[in-house]
Image: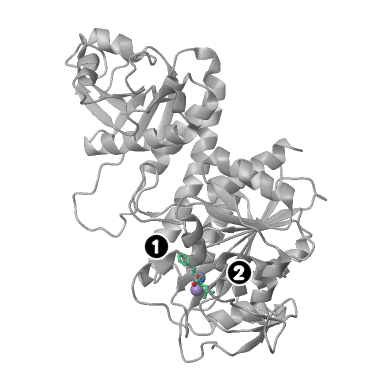
Amino acid sequence: MQFAVTCGDPLKQPGRAIIIGCFEQDLAAPFVAEFDRALRGCLGSLSGEGEFTGKLNKTALIHTLGRVAPDRLLLVGLGKKGELTRDRMRQAAGTAIKAMRGAGIKSFSSVLHLAAGGGKEWLQAEVEGHMLGGYAFDRYKTAVDSPVEVADVTLLLTDDASRGATEGCVAETQIVCSAVLLARELVDQPGNVATPAFLAEKAVEVSGKYGIDCRVMERDEMERTGMEALLAVAKGSSQPPRFIILEYRGGGAKERPIVFVGKGITFDSGGISLKPREGMEKMKNDMAGAAAVMGAVTAAARLRLPVNLVGLIPSAENLPGGRAYKPGDLIKVMAGKTVEIVNTDAEGRLVLCDALHYAQRYRPAALIDIATLTGACVVALGNFASGLMGNDDGLAKALKKAGETSGERVWELPLWDEYGELMKSDIADLKNAGGPTAGTISAAWFLKQFAGKSRWAHLDIAGTAWEEKGRPYLPKGATGVGVRLLVEYLRGVVQGK
Ligand code: BES
Ligand code: MN
Ligand code: ZN
C-alpha cells in the first residue's frame, strides 16, 4: 500500500473515490456539509432515512454522478463526536479499507483524518487502520478470485505548510505497520513451514536488509552454553531448536541496551502432557512473542531510533516424540537452578528462563519478555488486553502508557512473593507449573527468578496474539500484537533521554 500526501480541495479531487469521516447525527464535520450541498442534500436524506447516521464503523458508498470531482464518496461513521479516540480512528480506517476492497477500488483519496481536525496522531491512526485492516493472509489460496489489493491512498491536507511533517509521519507509520505485517505473516504461517529454522532464516534475511546484526545458535552451541531448558523442550521434535540473537546499535557505544525476549515455540502440542484436540491447530501461534520481537527490532532499526537494542528468541517445537522430556524429569537450567517438570505443556517459561538468564550478559537497561504464555491470561483478560507483570514500577508505567497510545493495551497483575508458594517443588529448586489458580502470575513468578537484578517486565499475549472473529483493523488470525506497543515504548525511552 502506497501513501501520497497532497494539498487540495476534496470536492475537486478527481479519482474513483474519496473517504469522508462522519460523526453521528452531525453534518458539521469538515466537508460533510459542502458535499451534501453539492450533492443536493443526498447526505442529509441518507441520515434522515436512518440509512447512514454516522455510527462507528458503518459505511455508505455513494455515486456522485459528476456533481463533484471524485466518482464516489465513501462515508465512514466515526461515532459520536465527543467520543472520538485514536482507536476509533484506526477502526474507521480499517472499516473503510474493507469497503473499498469490497467495491473493487484500488486507489482512492481520503480526508478521514481531517474529521478529527487534522493533527499527526489522527493521520497516524488513519494510516494504521488502512495498513492493518487491509491485511489478508492468502498466500496459500490457489483460487483465482483473490480479493482486490488496495494500492494507492492519497491523504488530503488543507494547508501545504504541514506537508513535510505529515509525509515524515506517514513514512514512519508505514515502517511500523509493515513490521506488524511481518509479525502477522510469521504467525499466520502454518507450523510445518514456520519451524525454528525458518524463523532463524527470516531473522537473518530481515537483519541483512536493515543493518541489524544477527547470530543464530544451533544445538551444539546451546549445549556448550548450557541452555538445558530450551534443549529439553526441543527434545520431542525432529525440528532442531534455534536461539536467535538480534542486535541493533543506534545508541552510544557504552550505552546499556534494552533487551526484548520473545517466546518462539513454533508449535505447542503440549508435549507428553498433550493438549486436547479442540483448537490445537491454533498453537502454531505460540511464536507470536518471537514475531513481535522481530518486528519491533526491525522497525526500530528502520526508524533509526537512537537506542541500543537486543532481541533474543529461543525457538523450538513442543512435541511428544520418543525422546521428549517427561513429567517427573529434572533439568538444570542455564542459570544453574534445578527445575522439576510437572507439566510438559508449561514449556514457554522454560525456553524463556534460559533466554532471560542469557540476557544478563548484556546488563540490560530494561529487559522485556513477550510470550503467549498462559491460557489463564485469556481467562482473566480476554482478547482486549495483554497481561503485564514485572519487578519495576517505572518500566510497568512506561509500558502502560505505550499501551494506551498504541491501542495495544496492557493490564498489570500483582506479582507478590506469596505466589512463589505455588512453584515449590519437593525435589528441586522450582517446579515448572503451579496448580489451577493464578496461572498467569505463577508463570511470571517463575520467570522473575531468572531476571536477575534487571528492570524486567513480562507481557503475556496469549489472549491478544490471535483474533477469532475479525475486528476492523484486526482481521481474523494473527494480530501482530506487541510490535506497535514495543516501538511506542522505545519512542518513550528516546523522548525521556
Ligand atoms: N502456549 C500455551 C498458552 C496459550 C494458551 C497460548 C492458549 C495461547 C492460547 C502455553 O504453553 C501453555 O500451554 N500453558 C499452560 C500452562 C499450564 C500447563 C501451567 C496453560 O496455560 O494451560
Ligand atoms: Mn504449552
Ligand atoms: Zn506454549
Q: Is residue 24 above or below residue 398?
A: above
In the shown orientation, is residue 297 left or right of residue 11? right
Instruction: Please name the residue shown 48% across and 18% down the image.
Output: 117
Q: From the image, tell me which residue sits under label 2.
A: 443
Could you tell me which secondary element the residue under label 2 belongs to? helix
Can residue 12 be seen in this snapshot?
no
Specify whether 117 is left or right of 310.
left
Residue 118 lies, in percent from the top left, at 49, 20
- The answer to whether 396 is drawn above or below residue 149 in the figure is below
Position in image of residue 218 (x %, y %):
60, 76
The amino acid at mark 2 is Ala
Q: Quadrant of residue 10?
A: top left
Tell me the SS state at disc 1: loop
The residue depicted at 65 percent of the width and 40 percent of the height is 491
Asked if the residue at label 2 sits under 8 Å from ligand 1, the reply is yes
x and y, in percent, of residue 388 in the image: 61, 55
Q: Amino acid at mark 1?
A: Gln
Name the quadrant containing residue 188: bottom left
Percent coordinates x, y for residue 459 in the rendering: 59, 57
The crowd level at tag 2 (other Cα within 10 Å; few <14, some 14-19, many 20+) is many
Q: What residue would you read off at disc 1?
A: 189
Q: CA distance from mark 2 to mark 1?
A: 27 Å
Which residue is at the far right?
A: 254
Answer left or right for 470 relative to 388.
left
Q: Quadrant of the C terminus?
A: top right
Rendered image: mark on residue 25? none
455 relative to 193, above or below: above
- Looking at the picture, tell me which residue is in the foreground, 162 or 381: 381
Q: Is residue 471 above or below residue 277?
A: above
Viewer-closest of 290 and 117: 117
Crowd band around label 1 with a 10 angstrom C-alpha radius: few (<14), some (14–19), many (20+) = some
Residue 116 or residue 383, whichever sits in front: 383
